[in-house]
Image: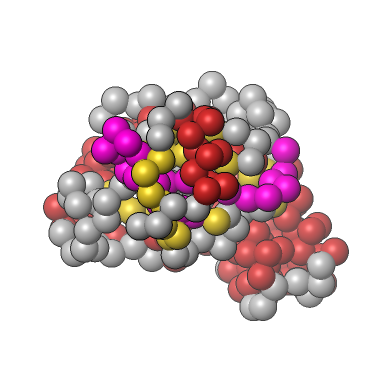
């Protein structure tokens, strides 16, 4: 590995440890990722983003810390430093996405994380989903929170960006009006909030580590719906282990589409394409 002086100096300021070498890391749509080798022998990941939105990296660090508080929960990388312009995490050495045992353990650990709960629907500070602001102000019920903090803000943004048609938007609005009858009552769970395959790192330690959270207190079916929307290797095995550890309410599979509306609208806002149409199609199932 070579050494990028600017990146290395910034990391040294935050860590108080010399950076021996740096190398770019592929992947990531938002921040630039760099691998650091420290004089202590430790390896770390540094994420940087010039002109990052206020609180961007701090929110990610807080989410990782909140998830990491759960004994026996899903593993997260240790936060080594966080600042307005960057985030430094302990490196997760990745392995093959093949061990069934890892998926089984992940299902059990995700159940433990969810069961740790939250103080309410939402969080005491706002966050981000991708580069989009994520409003987290608490609400009195999951149906209310899901409507006014998750679906309606991104439906409006998708409309403003021309990423959803009027008819598809109307289908989503019709579902919003029925959420109180469609969603079951449960206590708030401790959610990762952006739990898709790309945020699940299969480690050489045969554990699945989660990264890039958009954490808050919400309905656990949101995390599960996102896993089903974008896929995970050995997902049926993970779900079986989850349901055994923390049984799901009847009909959860039929409700996956309801909780997939949120990530579909977010993707419509960020990427356009067919995500708005897909949200409308999914919403129509619950008319």
Horizontal and vertical percent position of residue 25: 43, 60
Residue furthest to the top in view is 119
What residue span does the magenta drawing correspond to?
33-54
Question: Does residue 5 appear to the left or right of 3 in the view shown?
Answer: right
For the question of whether residue 263 can be seen, the reply is: no
Looking at the picture, tell me which residue is in the foreground, 97 or 261: 97
Residue drawn where x is 44% and y is 52% of the image: 3
Quarter of the image where the N terminus is located: bottom left
Looking at the picture, tell me which residue is in the foreground, 44 or 238: 44
Residue drawn where x is 27% and y is 51% of the image: 93
120, above or below 193, in the image: above
241, above or below 140, in the image: below
83, above or below 95, in the image: above
281, above or below 181, in the image: below
Q: Is residue 46 magenta?
A: yes
Horizontal and vertical percent position of residue 75: 31, 38
Horizontal and vertical percent position of residue 115: 37, 30
Image-quadrant location for residue 156: bottom right
For the question of whether residue 46 can be seen, the reply is: yes
Q: Is residue 18 magenta?
A: no
Residue drawn where x is 54% and y is 21% of the image: 119
Residue drawn where x is 72% and y is 38% of the image: 54
Give the image's coloring scheme.
Answer: secondary structure
Image-quadrant location for residue 43: top left
Residue furthest to the right in view is 160
Quarter of the image where the C terminus is located: bottom right
Image-quadrant location for residue 149: top right
């Amino acid at each position: 590995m070579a050494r990028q002086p600017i990146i290395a100096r910034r990391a040294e300021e935050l860590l108080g440890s010399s950076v021996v070498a740096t190398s770019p890391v592929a992947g990531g749509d938002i921040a630039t990722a760099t691998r650091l080798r420290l004089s202590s022998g430790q390896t770390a990941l540094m994420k940087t983003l010039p002109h990052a939105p206020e609180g961007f990296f701090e929110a990610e660090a807080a989410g990782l810390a909140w998830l990491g508080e759960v004994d026996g929960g899903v593993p997260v990388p240790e936060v080594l430093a966080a600042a307005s312009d960057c985030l430094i995490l302990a490196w997760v050495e990745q392995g093959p996405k093949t061990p069934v045992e890892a998926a089984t353990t992940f299902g059990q650990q995700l159940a433990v994380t969810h069961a740790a709960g939250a103080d309410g629907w939402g969080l005491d500070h706002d966050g981000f989903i991708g580069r989009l602001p994520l409003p987290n102000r608490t609400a009195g019920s999951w149906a209310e929170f899901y409507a006014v903090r998750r679906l309606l803000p991104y439906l409006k943004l998708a409309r403003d960006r021309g990423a959803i048609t009027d008819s598809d938007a109307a289908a989503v609005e019709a579902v919003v009006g029925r959420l109180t009858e469609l969603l079951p009552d449960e206590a708030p769970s401790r959610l990762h909030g952006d739990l898709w395959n790309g945020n699940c790192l299969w480690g050489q330690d045969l554990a699945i580590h989660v990264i890039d959270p958009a954490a808050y207190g919400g309905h656990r079916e949101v995390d599960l719906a996102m896993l089903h929307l974008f896929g995970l290797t050995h997902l049926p095995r993970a779900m079986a282990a989850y349901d055994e550890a923390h049984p799901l309410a009847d009909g959860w599979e039929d409700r996956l589409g309801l909780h997939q509306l949120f990530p579909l609208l977010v993707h419509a806002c960020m990427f356009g394409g067919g995500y708005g149409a897909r949200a409308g199609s999914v919403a129509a199932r619950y008319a």
